Image (cartoon, helix red, strand yellow):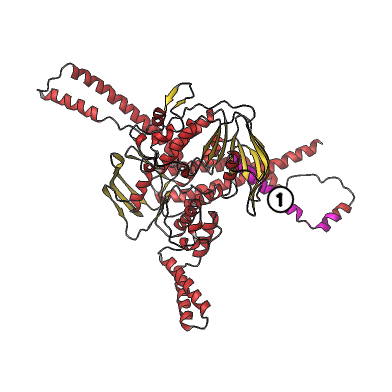
Amino acid sequence: MHLLSIENISKSYGEKVLFENVSFGLETGDKIGIIGVNGTGKSTFLKVIAGMEQADSGKVSIANHAVIRMLSQDPHFEPNETALEHVLGGDSPELRAHKQYVNAMEAIELNPSSEEAQEQLMQANMLMDDLNAWELESEAKLALNQLGINQFDMLVEHMSGGQRKRVAMAAALVLPSDILILDEPTNHIDNESVTWLEGMLQKRRGALLMITHDRYFLDRVSNRIIELDQGRAFFYQANYSRFLELKLEREESEASSEAKRKNLLRNELAWMRRGAKARSTKQKARIDRFEQLQASAPKEGNGKVELSVASSRLGRKIIEMENISKSFGDRQLIQDFSYIAVPGDRVGIVGRNGAGKSTLLKMIGAKLEPDTGKIDLGMTVKLGWFSQEREEMNESLRVQEYIREAAEQVKTADGSMISSSQMLERFLFSSTMQWTPIAKLSGGEKRRLQLLRVLMEAPNVLLLDEPTNDLDIATLTVLEDYLDDFPGVVFVVSHDRYFLDRTVDKIIGFENNGEQVIHTGNYSDYQDYVKQRGRETTVAAVQTSIKPKVVEQELEKPRQQERLLKMSYKEQRDYESIETWIMEAESEIENIATEMEVNASSAGLLIELSEKQQQAEQKLEQLMDRWAELNELADKIEAQKKG
């Protein structure tokens, strides 16, 4: 069903064109990711579509009765509003019915014998039945809980910025809407919440528009991509992986066209220099052609962020943590934790919100003291702290002044010296922008500037606290490449699974029981370890549930020869066929992916195929588990035969 039409919308701020003459339509089932370098106007683009800002020209047409709901980066809350009240505080018929029911229940509690109150409750019950609104409160509590908000009656005004964002997200998900608009939904939520949100949005039947830097999230949720680049919009019927392929093809085609244009321009320029006479029609046509070739030069793209800052020398002793503990009140966050950093360490710190991840990073950076234990830093350690708290920036400073506070010049990785102004240009801050007050930059531009200042100081140990928040994908990609060659040590707190997989080789996991585990591998390896450990715990729990008297009886029996292992008829049949079944399942997933590409323009069919894809992937995972189980049994049988 058609929900929205965008016709030739344009928006500028002063001389800066954010987007120009953009047109597209939105259908039920469309899940669109908006991509672009920070400062290209992505958030403004969504606000114009949502009706929160006016376009300079063009129009946005919404279908009759279509409801738009937007989660902005700065959500609004009413005074004295609790988390649950905010989530249930919409204006849909279901929510009005729920409010009427709550009011009727309160009236009955105050005066149980009142016939008027009883009549109100009966009417409210009937209305709840008619609208099937009984599950609304439980859905609201489930959404809040999944997003890490457990105190439903807590006043929103007493919450942190991250908690408020999560309350607003719960409301956006629970309140009915035909078009859901999300601006950086994965900021401020932990990995488990991101996975849950992913599943919610995959199942959602309406349309979705979102800005996110989380590439796994974008890949799994979106089926269309809009890229904003220097005022232009490029459209792709694809998820993020396919978008990368299509963008490469587009840029190669544009490069080829530009080469041809320059060759023609060169020939025309030679002719013009020979002294063209504009009197004849033929000569006039050639002059016009020359001018058209000049005018048809493509707009310069957003450029490329470059990181080539050198780091300071690092000695053998780096960071040694010995039996450190930290509590806040009665809450123990870290207990008896030890770790010795080694050269080249890339350590990811993961866990639920509030588990103590940033606390550990702050103790390493000497911004907090441990309650017990000690942290020793080597003599040559030069820390670079990239905080998620923008309050550390003096926003009254101009961009150039802020960077000069760190260094007037900096040595690059190749040993050359460049000025702060040149480094700013490499970071996409033009000479004009360099004299702009920081307060006038977008959130993403501030984060990019903050990152540059940290690296200008040439650290050899980087402490990165949620580095992916508000940075665009282009900058993240370059940061990842920089970390590949960074000779120092990195500790990073992040919920971005792609970034962790790409950059770290050790994980410090904050577990639900308040303990910390150290696991070698990236984030996906750690997740596999957690799942496997969960399966082993389940098996152990089943084994220990055997009644003690049965165990005693077995112990009293004389030791008998160990029972010979062998496969049952079903196990033998599965063992012989399992690899064929796995190949068939993999082939089915490939066929579905091909169908999704072919039918990228059919929203309804894409939803159906997406569900099939999920089922096929689940089937393959079950087959792989069965394959591992049967192979383990076969190995044991073989070992038993040998000895």
* Magenta-colored stretch includes residue 543: yes
Residue 339, given in percent of the width and then of the height, sits at 66, 37
- The outermost residue toward the left is 279
Residue 16, given in percent of the width and then of the height, sits at 30, 39
User: What residue is drawn where x is 46% and y is 49%?
Assistant: 185
Residue 257, given in percent of the width and then of the height, sits at 31, 28
For residue 399, side relative to residue 101 (left or right): left
- 171 or 575: nearer the eye? 171
Q: Is residue 103 above or below residue 535?
A: below
Which secondary structure class fits the magenta region best? helix
- 584 or 478: nearer the eye? 478
Tell me where residue 527 sits by quadrant: top right
In this orientation, does residue 149 appear?
Answer: yes
Residue bearing the label numbered 1: 539
In this orientation, does residue 477 appear?
Answer: no
**Quadrant including the C terminus:** top right
User: What residue is drawn where x is 59% and y is 28%?
Assistant: 380
Residue 586, given in percent of the width and then of the height, sits at 55, 41
| Kind of residue sitting beneath label 1 | Val
For residue 21, side relative to residue 196 (left or right): left
Q: Which residues are magenta?
A: 524-552
